Amino acid sequence: MDRRQWLQRLGLSAGVISLPFVSAGGASGQETKPPDVTPRHLPPLKITDVKTILTAPAGIRLVVVKVLTNEPGLYGLGCATFTQRARVVKTAVDEFLRPFLIGKNPLAIEDVWQSCYVSSYWRNGPVLGNALSGVDMALWDILGKRAGMPVFQLLGGKCRNAVDTYRHASGTNLKEVEDAVRKAMEAGFRHVRAQIGVEGQATYGAGTSAVKGTSETERARTETWEPRQYTRLVPKMFEHLRVQLGDDVELLHDTHERIPPILAMQLCRDLEPYKLFFLEDPFSPEDVGYFEKLRALTSTPLAMGELFNNPNEWLSLVSGRLIDFIRIHMSQIGGLTPARKVAALCEFFAVRTAWHGPGDVSPVGHAANVHLDLATPNFGVQESRIFTQAEQDVFPGCPELKNGYYYASDRPGLGIDLNEELAAKFPITDDPPFDMRWGNLRRRDGAITKP
């Protein structure tokens, strides 16, 4: 084959290069077209509709976005769950992103993400982040289905066979917590997050409330929180667990951003003898400036990020090597597209991933977490959820949790589907339509405090 034949086979001719897209802008003032990323052997794809599905099969408000295309049967699903503002996210998707997206190429994932991100002058924030995430994850799902590959393959392929996870264990006293941790260990979990309730206080994450047996509204008015009793109790809990369970199990704890920075720094030092896998959210996002001081004080591994939605909240923490695990809620920051970039950034600074994954992440969101976990070399651990039967029925193809590991489906895309007819049988019917307790947590003297 001579040079001319070789150039012709590549679609080139001597001195002429065919560009991958055509600009219609310039002096004429015509609109500039986005890049054409459609493979030449496939017909052009277009987004024909975008739907938002609200459902609560486990009693938690979930938001799922479905992106449909002009190819019959080809659609994608994404998680857009902001459980305290589910209806606001639905409005953002249906009234603002949907008309913006119809007609666009769903395979142009990066271009769609960037254009949606700047489609309103004010950006960042959990409402836009979750709305955008629902669309973004759905586009990755579509790409995988179109390519006939699972999403983890599109992200570079597996770095591991399965995803190691941690389970929550809590109680109102030391023995209850010990029993819960033992139960998790017997189920095959090597990592367990231990939480303990404080008598008479609303200890978030430990399944306790200051007022039991009352309505959600009444409980919201009366829940109290005082940090000092909590910070004295937590080291006692871990001392008890290490004495009773030894060092083979990896133990974690979440402070839920609730305690003043100076108490958080003392708690990190008090927990050093018990060798935690990590201590999560010692500071609130408003107090991240304290991490530089904390890093110099303690060797306790630090995890942070589930409330972040602005890159400036985590860039300095990662580049300064001030945290050990990034705990971002993937849908809050905008989906798989930004999350894979965060993971790549963290790799260069020895920060591991530990994506947020409780019950207020839909099974679709959990599937996205697992696909990225499988393809991330600096993966740390994944927060897991045991899906209820109702969740598994509404979302066929939930990630399989076995012996403490998540396993992703090898089916194309995210490997998970949505039964819309069944989802409609679990509507969001709450009145009031959000968690009243948030924004109502108070000190004993009545002063508001951070949830």
Image (cartoon, grey):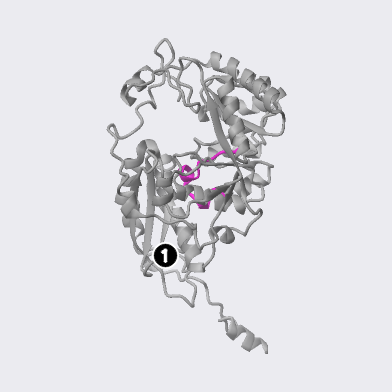
**Residue at (35, 41) in percent of width and height:** 86
Q: Which residue is mark 1?
A: 105
Residues 84 and 171: in front is: 171
Residue 101 occupies quadrant: bottom left
List x then y, in percent, for residue 285.
52, 30
**Residue at (45, 59) in percent of width and height:** 139
Residues 400 and 94: in front is: 400
Residue 55 position (above or below residue 262): below
Please state which amino acid type lies under the numbered disc 1: Asn
**Residue at (62, 47) in percent of width and height:** 345
Residue 192 occupies quadrant: top right
Q: How would you rate the neighbour count of disc 1 (Cα within 10 Å): few for under 14, some for 14-19, many for 20 or more? A: many
Majority secondary structure of magenta residues: helix
Residues 431 and 246: in front is: 246
List x then y, in percent, for residue 38.
47, 71
Quadrant placement of the C terminus: top left
- Helix, strand, or loop for circle 1? loop
**Residue at (61, 52) in percent of width and height:** 374
338 part of magenta stretch: yes
List x then y, in percent, for residue 96.
32, 50
Residue 345 position (above or below residue 242): below
Q: Which residues are magenta?
A: 326-340
Quadrant placement of the N terminus: bottom right
Residues 340 and 240: in front is: 240
Left or right placement of residue 440 versus residue 341 in this view: left
Residue 321 position (above or below residue 98): above
Instruction: Report the number of discs.
Output: 1
